[in-house]
Image (tube, helix red, strand yellow):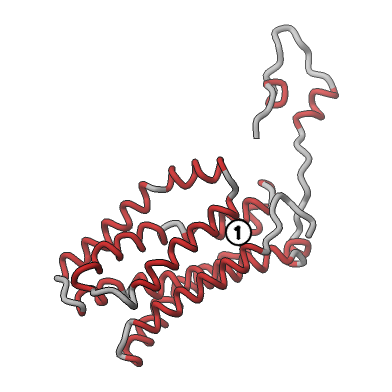
């Protein structure tokens, strides 16, 4: 949000601060108590969506290297694909930040999830030895942002004064998802003797998150 110099305390030379000036410095922000936060449907949409997104992503993330090696790609190449994807994911953050300024966080979040669904489905269809490396790099690059989408969405609903409270409330589910995803993924692969179920489950999870994020009311909406 852009402000005039006067709004951030930069007054013209010789100008004295008045009561009006001081009042202008106070940006009207709604105070979100824990009870009010928990009563807001958007909070639950974001928290549940983040839990599903992080669980789905971590479930696949910890299986892509063995997926590639079982498909005929060397251990070093498989690890390189994961590393390269993570590096590119980090480098892409400024691009996503720029797009968020141009559009909205909600639209960008949904866009990222759609882009993540595509390779998740393609994992079940491709010849691993031919396309697996490139697809893992693409998937990892895109999904690197998914781990922070929940916090980004919270920032569109709750103001700066309440952001610490609300992120603290969602912290336990985020941590639980990070631990649950790899465990579920490893168990599913061992039990089903196939990677296909986790890729399908990941794609379905992303579809669910899109639905939840789509229903979030942003901009400190009372709904």
Q: Residue 170 or 138: which is nearer the viewer? A: 138
Q: Which residue is mark 1?
A: 167
- Residue 207: give x, y in percent of width and height: 53, 71
Q: Residue furthest top?
A: 14
Q: Residue 113 or 77: which is nearer the viewer? A: 113
Q: Residue 201 or 1: which is nearer the viewer? A: 201
Q: Residues within 10 Å of mark 1 (few under 14, many from 20)?
A: some
Q: Residue at x 33, y 57 (%)?
A: 86
- Residue 24: give x, y in percent of width and height: 79, 28
Question: 35 above or below 12?
Answer: below
Relative placement, left or right, of 74 versus 220 is left
Question: 174 above or below 19?
Answer: below
Q: Residue furthest right?
A: 19
Quadrant of the image containing the C terminus:
bottom right
Quadrant of the image containing the N terminus:
top right
Q: Residue at x 83, y 19 (%)?
A: 18
Q: Secondary structure at mark 1?
A: helix
């Amino acid at each position: 949000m852009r402000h005039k110099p006067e709004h951030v305390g930069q007054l013209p030379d010789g100008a004295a601060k008045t009561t009006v000036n001081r009042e202008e410095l106070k940006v009207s922000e709604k105070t979100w108590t824990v009870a009010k936060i928990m009563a807001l449907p958007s909070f639950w949409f974001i928290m549940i969506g983040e839990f599903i997104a992080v669980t789905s992503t971590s479930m696949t993330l910890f299986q892509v290297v063995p997926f590639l090696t079982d498909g005929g790609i060397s251990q070093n190449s498989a690890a390189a694909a994961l590393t390269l994807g993570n590096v590119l994911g980090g480098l892409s953050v400024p691009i996503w930040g720029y797009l968020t300024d141009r559009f909205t966080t909600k639209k960008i979040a949904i866009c990222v999830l759609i882009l993540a669904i595509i390779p998740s489905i393609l994992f079940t269809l491709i010849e691993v030895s031919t396309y697996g490396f490139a697809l893992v790099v693409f998937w990892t690059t895109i999904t690197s942002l998914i781990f922070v989408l929940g916090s980004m969405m919270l920032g569109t609903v709750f103001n700066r004064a309440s952001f610490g409270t609300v992120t603290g409330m969602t912290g336990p589910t985020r941590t639980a998802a990070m631990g649950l995803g790899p465990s579920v993924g490893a168990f599913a692969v061992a039990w089903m003797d196939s990677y296909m179920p986790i890729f399908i489950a990941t794609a379905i999870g992303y579809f669910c998150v899109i639905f939840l994020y789509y229903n979030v009311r942003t901009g400190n909406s009372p709904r």
